[in-house]
Amino acid sequence: MHDLSAAIRAALALPGWRAHLAGAAPETPLEALPVLRKADLPALQKGAPPFGGFAAAPATMARLFASPGPIFEGVTAGPDPWRFAPALRAAGIGAGDVLLNCFGYHLTPGGFIFDEAARALGCAVIPAGPSGTQQIVEAIAAYRPTAYSGTPDFLKILIEACDAAGLDVSALRAAVVTGAAFPPSLRDWAAARGIRAVEAYGTAELGLIAWREPGGEGMRVADGLILEVVRPGTGDPLPEGEVGELLVTIPDPAHPVLRFSPGDLTARLPGGRIRGWMGRADQTVKVRGMFVRPEQVAEIARAHPGLGRLRLVVTREGESDEMTLLAEGEDAAGLEATIRAATKLRGRVEMVARGSLPADGKVIEDRRPVA
């Protein structure tokens, strides 16, 4: 495990982190540092291209990428830079395997993430990317891959296409899947085909975060990370089991990442595990032409510390947007004024019983009909 103070010191040497961490010092406790959200990166990078001052110069990188947003990322040279090898190893993938890699290699880093991890383990890699199904089926027939990386639904499409063509795919015995839902029905299908399928959870900015092995409870957190689950829009920690916004810290002085939110919801489980991806933490909505954000609901909560959970519900009444704050507690005094001060919009208040709002991480709920 790296030293957090050394990582903070390294971050303060980079102009973007230094501005973001204004007032922090190497000995500042982690929970006192501000949250950096992925949703803010496009604007920060546009102001100081290409990386917003949060990483070293592009010339020091081995590869440079552009993900939707746009968000620009670079990766330095070295084996398995996104640290995905443990997920492949958990699936039983290693030296001597031939990996069919169906993630894209163009501008976005998905293909390279798995390519680098597999090669670090001694695998040969078929860089299929999201090519046409028929072309990949031909490669499967020629190379007889023993492992797969890609989305779980595409794995099923490929195997069913091989079945239709009368090809033997029994050599394929392991898979690491991500990028789409992996429901129990697909897990059972993979197991029935004799495939040990591990579900990985990670991002281009953070690398591997966690993985779920077949039959496992929750997801195992990757080594070297510090994970927090906080109330959306805040840095306030939540108890084990309650759904909230995931924050990831990588205390590596060579590439410091401090309290970074990929914008996902999860919950901590016993044994240092997490439930995995449970939805998006950014619940921003537009009401009467004004953006309303989770941070503003958190501001209301701070102004009324005696309340329990809060949920701001947005509805459509006639031709007008309406807001109602559901608040656990008994005292509504001053709440409407606080809503107006925090959001610059009028909102009603409805008091509800303590413990009646679900612990699902949702602080803003948009109930307006979809046009």
Image (cartoon, helix red, strand yellow):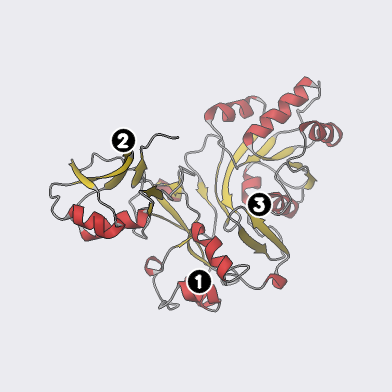
For the question of whether residue 1 can be seen, the reply is no
Residue 13 is at least partly visible in this image:
yes
Above or below, 332 against 5 in this view is above
Q: Residue 347: x percent and y percent? A: 24, 48
Snapshot quadrant of residue 179 = top right
Q: Which mark is residue 318?
A: 2
Instruction: Measure how far apart labels 3 and 1 are at the Cα level.
Output: 23 Å
Mark 3 in CB contact with mark 2 (< 8 angstroms): no
Q: Residue at x 70, y 72 (%)?
A: 60
- Quarter occupied by residue 107: bottom right
Q: Residue at x 13, y 53 (%)?
A: 333
- CA distance separating discs 2 and 1: 57 Å
Residue 272, image x and y in percent?
Answer: 44, 51
At a point 32% along the width and 39% down the height, the residue shown is 315
Question: Of circles 2 and 1, which is in front?
Answer: 2
Q: Alpha-carbon neighbours of circle 2 within 10 Å: few (<14), some, or many (≥20)? A: few
Percent x, y for residue 366?
A: 37, 41
As drawn, is 302 to the left or to the right of 262? left
Q: Residue at x 48, y 52 (%)?
A: 263
Which residue is under mark 1? Answer: 3
Q: Which residue is mark 3?
A: 85
In the picture, the quarter occupied by the C terminus is: top left
Q: Pick the residue in front: 206 or 364.
A: 364
The residue most toward the front is 319
Marks 3 and 1 in Cβ contact (< 8 Å): no
